[in-house]
Each structure stands twice: as structure tokens, then as C-alpha cells.
Image (cartoon, rainbow, N blue to C red):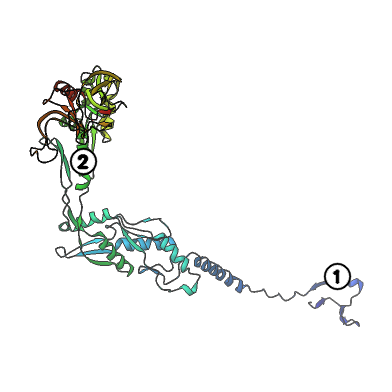
Amino acid sequence: MTDLVARQNAGDVSNDPSGSDTAVVDSAAADTESYEWAPAEPSKKKRHLGLWIGIPAAAAVVSLVVASLVLIAPGTTVAGVGIGGMTVGSAAETISKKLADTTVVITGVDGSAEVTAGQLGASVSAAATDAQVTGDELGASVDAQALAEKAFSDSPMWKVSSWNAEPAAAPAVTLDETKAADALRAVAPALFVEPVNATIAFDAATASYAVTPAVDGAGVDIESIRAALEKGFAAGESRVEIAATPTVVPASASTDAVTATATQLNTILDTAGFYVGEERTVPIDRAVAASWITLSTGDDGTYSYDVDEAAIQPSVDALAAAINRDPVNGTEITDTQGKVLRTITAGADGRTVGDTSGVAAAYAAQLADGNGVFATPVTVVPAQVTKTSRNIVVNLSEQRTYLYENGQVIDSFLISSGKAGFSSHTGNFRITAKLTSQNMGNQDLTKAPNYYTPNVPDVMYYNGDEALHGAYWHNNFGNVMSHGCINMPLDKAANVFDWAPMGTEVTVTY
């Protein structure tokens, strides 16, 4: 409180008995007197210096905390590349650039040759992802994004204990082999000999496709380059020296691959034709078939071929004249069960070529697939085959032989069978051997069978040494005369010999 000061023209200020200061004036003077409060001492202003210092400091701390959440810990390296304090993206770019800028020195090639890892098409792969970050224009690439993310995951800035940690494991380096070979060839051409592809050509002399073998070239072992680059990159080196390791560079069109194509083509030539069933009714000349085929090579030197439909058409137009025919009826001799013993006349079905409007196109497509066998559309007229069964019956009681066709007797005649002591055996047999002439017996008559008959005609064995045959030494047919064989008149024996094929059934009975 300020003291009350009374200024007056007259009068005093006295102390109030209560103890408070009071101005004492009379009422008249009150209208002419003026009073005022003495101004109070100004209050001191509060100082806010701490506030102005605290705000920037807090902001700095927040910024530091935020940064620690996105930056890699100081001292972190990948393949010798320092990426501490970087964001994942910056770290990835740094790793990629380091690999791309790594210089590879190929030694022992007229001194040495230098090429950057980028020119080799190098890249680093991480198992966690197949993402790739393209490097410089020389073609180097490194899967650095995954590596940087792994480094941040293991060593974030906020994790102080991970600062200056052991270097991260070096990633595996891979090479784009085509880019690597091109780059090496450019800087060290002496190391390379171009391979020569195998070739195919139609040889008119042999009417076949012949192969000229491939010749392998030479080059540099890309794997040895990759391994050395990987080792150097892992060690953080920016320059890697590598002794060139020669390797064989096979032709892109190998002898085996081209031979496989030639074999397919020659198989077409071997089988080319228009077939009716299993018969190659209209074979196609090998040179003609080859003229339908056009060979071509791909960028890698391997072969393919096309077939000209128009070139096939003239052969299709000639099919009717070559295939059409009338049926030919046949005749066969069988046993009593129908088994064919002899074909007298072979039957042949008649046939007529069907619609050929799409044959050339169909055959061209088939040849393109390697199949030279074309099943020709035909209408078949079956041949008629006449079958005649034949068998022989020898009746020992009657001393007579009967010839049967289709169960009917067509001839019979007297014979002479085995005499006493040499009786002919009965049973069901088949003719197993036929001889137009044979000497029978033994010239030494003191030895079994104690007889000798030369030049016995039309011999037909049916049971061991028993046979039907002609007999010129007697004319006593109708009576037993032989040593077990069936003697027949000469004319009848000759007729039976021609009439009865091998396998004809012979029944000897009483």
C-alpha cells in the first residue's frame, strides 16, 4: 500500500487513534482540497529464459530420436562399405556403386586387362528377397536393398550396443555370364576363340542329310572370375586381380543337337510315302522328299525346317493311278480244321483312293512333326478267298487210299502196305517231309533193313520212317508188299505229291 499524502492549504494531518493514518479536515475545506494516492513501486517482471532454451533443445532431442529410428548405426559396414548413419535407401545405393566401381584386373594377357565389375554384369543376391537395384550404366547390379534393410534390422542407430559392430557378412556375388563374356572379350580378345556350329546339308550322292561336326571354341572361366570378385568385394577391395582361367566354349549348335535333327530328317526320307495299311503303296523318292523340306537356322545356329505343301501336291495328284485296283480273288488249301497249308492264289483286296483335297496340307503338317508315313484314305473292296480242305485216308483192310476235298472223296486207288512183320502203323499223322526221289534201304544187304531200293519217287514221310511213295518195282497193288510204307502206283504217287501240301493230314486205319 502507498501512504496517503494530504496536501492542503490549511490544517494538519493527525494520527487516528485507531492506529491508521487519517486525514482530518473540516467539511468546508473538503470541497477545495485535492487528494491523490502515491504511485506504488512497479512490480518486477518474471524472466522466461528457461522456456526459450528448452523448446529448441526438446526439438533437437525429438529430431535425434526420429533419426535414430531410420538410420543405420555408426560403424556399420557391408563388404567394406561404410553405411553407418545412412538411411536404408542411401546405404543400398552406396553398396551398389561400390560393386559397380570395383575394378577387375585380368592378369597374364599381354600384361593385364582391366574391366569393372559393372561391365561383368555383377550382382549380389540376398536370400531374403529377389529384389534388385540397378547399378550404373555398365550393367552392375546388387541386391543392396535387402542387404541395407538387414544391416538396419541388425544395427539401428537407436541401438547403441550395435554401434561399430562386426561387419555384416559379405553377400554372394553373381555374374550375368553373357555380359561378363562380352566385357572380357572386349578387353582381352586373345583369350577367346569363337566356336563353329555344326551344320546340316542334303547330300545328293547318298540321298541323305549329312552333318558337319561343331568345333568348340575357347574363353575364360566365368566362375573363377566370379569367385575372385566375390572374395575381393567381401574384403572391401576396390581392385581385384584375377589370373584368367581358360575354358572350353561349346558351340551353341552342338554336333549332337544337329545330328538329332539330321536323324529326324533321314528317318522321314527312309519312310516317306503314301501307305495303305502297313504297305508303302506309293514310296516317295528320297531326293523328292528332301525337295519338299526347307532348312533354316535360329540365332543360336540350331536347325528347324518347314515343309512346302505346294511341292507335295503333284504326288497327291498321282495317287489314284498308283493305288486304285480291282480285287483279286484267292485260293487256299487248308486242313480239315481250316488251317492254311498252301496258298494257290493270293487274294488281294481292291481299293479306290478317297477324297484327296486336304492330303497335301495334312502330309505337310505331319512331315513337320517328323512323321513320313501317310495313311492314304482309300475305300477297300475285299477279295474273295476260296478255301479247300484236303486230307488222305489209307484203309489197310481195303488196301486202298482215299483223297478228300472238303469232306468229299475225289479219288481212290489201290496201294500196298506193310507185309507181315513190317505192318504199317495206324493213327492220325501229317506229312512232315517231301522228297522227289530217295534211295531207300542199305546197299549192304547183310545189314538192316536188308534191302536196297534206289531212286524211290515222290516220297512223303508222315510217321517217322513210314512214307507214302511211288513203287516202280511191282504192280501188285491191293496186296501187302512193303516194309511198312504205303506203296502207290507211280502216276498216283506223282499226283498226290503235287496235290498234298506239307502238313496234310494222313489217317491210317483198318
* Residue situated in front as seen by the camera: 117 or 348: 348
* Residue situated in front as seen by the camera: 483 or 252: 483
Work out which quarter of the rendered image holds the C terminus and state it: top left
Quarter occupied by residue 470: top left
- Circle 1 residues within 10 Å: few <14, some 14–19, many ≥20: few
Residue 460 lies, with reference to residue 128, above or below; the image says: above
Residue 389 lies, with reference to residue 201, above or below; the image says: above
Q: Considering the numbered disc 1 on the image, is that residue within a helix, a strand or a loop? A: helix
Residue 207 lies, with reference to residue 472, above or below; the image says: below
Residue under label 2, please give it: 263
Q: Position of residue 360 (x, y in %)?
A: 26, 25
Answer with mark 2 or mark 1, whichever residue precedes in sequence.
1
Residue under label 1, please give it: 32
Quarter occupied by residue 101: bottom left
Residue 452 appears left or right of 295: left
Q: Position of residue 384 (x, y in %)?
A: 28, 18
Residue in the image at 37% along x and 63% along y: 94
Quarter occupied by residue 290: top left
Residue 247 appears left or right of 27: left
Q: Position of residue 442 (x, y in %)?
A: 10, 38
Q: Is residue 383 visible?
A: no
Q: Measure how far apart labels 2 and 1 are at the Cα level.
A: 144 Å
Work out which quarter of the rendered image holds the N terminus and state it: bottom right
- Circle 2 residues within 10 Å: few <14, some 14–19, many ≥20: some
Residue 472 appears left or right of 236: left
Q: Where is residue 413 in the image (x, y as percent from the top left)?
A: 21, 20
Badge 1 amino acid = Thr
Badge 2 amino acid = Thr
The disc label shown at residue 507, or none:
none
> CB of mark 2 within 8 Å of CB of mark 1?
no
Q: Considering the numbered disc 2 on the image, is that residue within a helix, a strand or a loop? A: helix
